[in-house]
Image: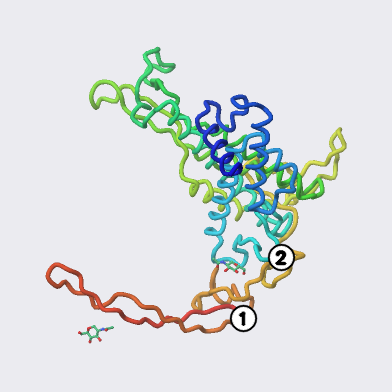
């Protein structure tokens, strides 16, 4: 009873408070702490992470943004899977063999780990920002139409007005949350300094993916149709746009290594193997060449392609030739029923059920 009650309590107090997240001040400190503990333990247990003190602390500090962050991480992962569904490495995490959310089920230091970290990072930024903005609009009851109410103060540029309401997407909120969560994760990976730097860099590219794909929406205001004055605000594009942008960067990822020359503080920055140059801020980077991902091998983070559906024709990505790594494929007969021979009878569609035979191919 106490437990259910506290969950409701925490959610209500968090959403009705004016500060985003868990409003600890509005409750007696002891009670608030206890509630946050129970709530966070329950959340993290779902991912087998209730013993991770770093994540527990992060969650306790601000449970609601943390929750949105986890949701965003998952969305980023879904986009990663979608982008790589026809590839040998398909961004699937090894759930059966101990992969947990924020676990380590990937080839370390490879370009696949780069894209996975970048896409999940972008997912957190996007989701947290969206949730924060819609929460903000709900609280002050601003509808989309209100966004184009003009502030009567003189505009900064004579032809560009400012809204009475702040309708800009506040991407900084998302970026901060993403950075906190990804840094906590990265530090927990127990990687060496090089790999840590690589991961931090790629997480930053992920955050950048959302920011560079913001779009400015402008409405014409003033005399009808003349558009002699505009009112603009920033909106985020769909996560798709950011993850496509990242996908392109995966193809052009730069291999890096520790520089031969140390900096004053003794650390060695990462430089590109090709030109010994500092990688660009929007380049995905990796340290190790990828395994071929053909066989199951936990030591390389490869799940293998046994049992994957493949395309018998062609020889590109997703073809049996490529996907099955020369092991060959098996034919499967699948029957499914579908509506057929439909005709219009007295204004109603009348269909028959037909069986359809399909032939599918899977990797040996
Ligand atoms: C991705 O690969 C894994 C491991 O080979 C496989 O189990 C899974 O079904 C694949 N997912 C898709 C969508 O093909
Ligand atoms: C559809 O209707 C035609 C003519 O009535 C029939 O010959 C055919 O077998 C039907 N198709 C199926 C799949 O039942």
Q: Report the residue at 73% width, 60% height from top.
A: 289
- Does residue 97 appear in the picture of this structure? yes
Which mark's residue is nearer the viewer, 1 or 2?
Answer: 1
Horizontally, residue 216 falls left or right of residue 34, namely left
Nearer to me, 240 or 246: 240
> Could you tell me residue 155's position as x and y percent?
41, 16
- Where in the figure is residue 185, as x and y percent of width and height? 71, 46
Residue at the image position 38 percent from the left and 27 percent from the top: 147
Whole-percent x and y of residue 244? 52, 51
Q: Residue at x 77, y 65 (%)?
A: 299
Residue at image position (45%, 28%) is 139
Horizontally, is 141 left or right of 86 in the view? left
Q: Is residue 14 left or right of residue 195?
A: left
Query: Does residue 211 sit above or below 232 in this rendering?
Result: below
Q: Which residue is mark 1?
A: 364
State the mark number for residue 291. 2
Q: Mark 1 falls on what kind of element? A: loop
Q: Earlier in the sequence, mark 1 or mark 2?
A: 2
């Amino acid at each position: 009873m106490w437990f259910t009650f506290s969950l409701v309590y925490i959610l209500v107090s968090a959403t009705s408070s004016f500060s985003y997240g868990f409003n600890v001040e509005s409750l007696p400190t002891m009670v608030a702490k206890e509630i946050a503990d129970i709530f966070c333990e329950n959340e993290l247990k779902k991912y087998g992470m209730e013993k991770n003190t770093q994540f527990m602390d992060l969650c306790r500090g601000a449970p609601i943004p943390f929750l949105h962050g986890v949701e965003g991480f998952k969305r980023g992962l879904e986009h990663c899977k979608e982008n790589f569904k026809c590839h040998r490495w398909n961004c699937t995490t090894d759930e059966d063999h101990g992969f947990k959310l924020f676990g380590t089920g990937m080839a370390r230091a490879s370009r696949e780990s780069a894209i996975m970290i970048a896409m999940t990072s972008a997912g957190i930024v996007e989701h947290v920002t969206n949730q924060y903005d819609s929460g903000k609009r709900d609280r002050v009851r601003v509808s989309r139409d209100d966004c184009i109410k003009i502030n009567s103060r003189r505009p900064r540029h004579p032809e560009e007005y400012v809204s009475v309401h702040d309708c800009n997407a506040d991407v900084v909120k998302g970026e901060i949350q993403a950075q906190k969560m990804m840094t906590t994760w990265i530090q927990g990976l127990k990687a060496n300094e090089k790999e840590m730097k690589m991961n931090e860099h790629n997480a930053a590219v992920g955050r950048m993916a959302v920011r560079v794909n913001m779009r400015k929406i402008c409405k014409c205001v003033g005399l009808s149709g003349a558009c002699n004055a505009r009112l603009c605000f920033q909106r985020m594009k769909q996560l798709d746009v950011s993850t496509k942008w990242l996908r392109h960067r995966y193809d052009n990822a730069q291999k890096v290594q520790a520089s031969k020359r140390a900096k004053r503080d003794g650390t060695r920055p990462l430089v590109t193997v090709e030109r010994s140059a500092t990688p660009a801020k929007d380049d995905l980077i990796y340290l190790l060449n990828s395994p071929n991902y053909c066989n199951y091998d936990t030591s390389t983070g490869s799940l293998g392609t046994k049992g994957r559906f493949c395309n018998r024709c062609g020889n590109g990505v997703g073809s049996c030739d490529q996907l099955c790594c020369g092991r060959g494929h098996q034919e499967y007969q699948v029957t499914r029923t579908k509506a057929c021979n439909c005709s219009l009878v007295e204004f109603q569609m009348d269909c028959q059920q037909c069986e359809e035979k399909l032939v599918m191919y899977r990797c040996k």
